Image (cartoon, helix red, strand yellow):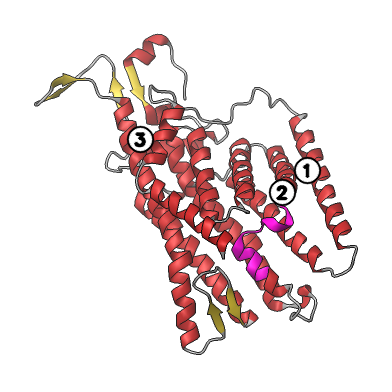
Amino acid sequence: MASYSDSEEKVIINVAEDFDAATQGSGYNGHFSEWRKNKDNPFTFNFEKNTKEKIFNESRGFETPSQTEEGKKVLGAIMRETGIIMLIVIVLRNIVGKIAVVALDAVGVDIHTNLFSTGIYGGSTEIVAITIVLALVTLLIPVVYLHKRMKIPVKAGIMHTVRDSAEIIGAIGFAMIFCTIVCLPEAYSSETKDIYTYFASAETDVSVWNQKDFIIYTVFDVVILSVLTELLFRGGIFSVLRQFGDVTAVVVTTAMAVLLTSDFFSMPAALFISFVSSIGMLRSGTIYTAIIVRIVYKMYQLAIVILEVDPSANMIITRNLFMICVFTVGVILAAIVINTGDRKNKRYMVKYKSEFTESRRLLFAVKVFPFPAVAMLCIVQAISALMY
């Protein structure tokens, strides 16, 4: 928030004009502020008040507009849409996806599924094709829905200007550290584990690097899915939520990423990678940092899978050595960035100050329906995954 003298603060309050994303520059701030000025958009927090004036209401007489109540109204609208977006992802991934596989199976395509698992079985080409299509649909529809519904332009919804390239290196370093700590071999998400296990099975009698289907899926999983995932979380939902401060945006988007895994084993990785992506984006000024962090995470997963294909007795040693090397390089990169330049006093997060405090905002946000219901559904799915 911009700073004011006591006299100014008592006279004029304009939450849209006061917004100042320190690492984004005037271009981004201008587009973001312009989007927020749309009075007809229920998802833009554009409260204005002259503290020396009161508004006359025919039923209640003269009254002072409440910044807190207006904030709750807008945040509530955003969180309702957030819950709907999460529900769209779940329905597309778990219901529409299974219906599509069953329909293809019925017309003779070599692809099958079990209603009680996330696995898809059949020919490798068919598996890769349907997995890619379903993943694209599952992410593209929520991204398009979000931008159309909240009417946020690309220049206001995506941070694209690199303000500090060293912070990108630092984010990569922290990603490598957390990958080693929480992304252990058994910590794959269920979908990734299923398809990579298929390619690594005994029935696959050629090297993985010579399998066209494996390479196509890997490029899609590592690069394209990383881009789409960050466009949804850091390029859409994050931007809308940061009207109420970056802490609120980081916490809510991280919670969403964790819940949508619907897998207890992959939740720790989702938590740390989402957190590093958010902070890295804010410190560097660009969403490219978040995308790179997610690519590093995906590449780490892939490397572990490839190492575990090795049937020799040296596999465990090789895998552990790889993990130690990744962790060491991560520590070095993070330490170099932390200890170079004047970063201790650098302001990189937007703070929103009001009587509606950060803790109260977060508590209010997670209670807005359907977010808590969808969150519970994700937890139930995670419990079911442990049982089957």
Name the mark on residue 45: 3
Dot 2 and dot 3 residues touching (CB under 8 Å): no
Q: Name the residue under label 2.
A: 179
Nearest-to-viewer mark from 2 and 1: 2
The quadrant in which the C terminus is found is bottom right
At which x and y percent is residue 168?
A: 69, 42
Mark 1 closeness class: few <14, some 14–19, many ≥20 residues within 10 Å: many
Three-letter amino acid code of the residue under disc 2? Cys
Q: Distance between the residues labelled 2 and 1?
A: 10 Å
Q: Is residue 96 visible?
A: yes
Tell which residue pokes out farthest to the bottom in this image.
108
Residue at 46 percent across and 37 percent down: it is 242
Q: Name the image quarter holding residue 129.
A: bottom right
Could you tell which of marks 2 and 1 lies nearer the N-terminus?
Answer: 2
Q: How far apart are marks 2 and 3 (CA)?
A: 37 Å
Q: Mark 1 points at which residue?
A: 330
Residue at 52 percent across and 60 percent down: it is 384
Provide the residue span drawn in magenta.
184-196
- As displayed, is residue 72 above or below residue 9? below
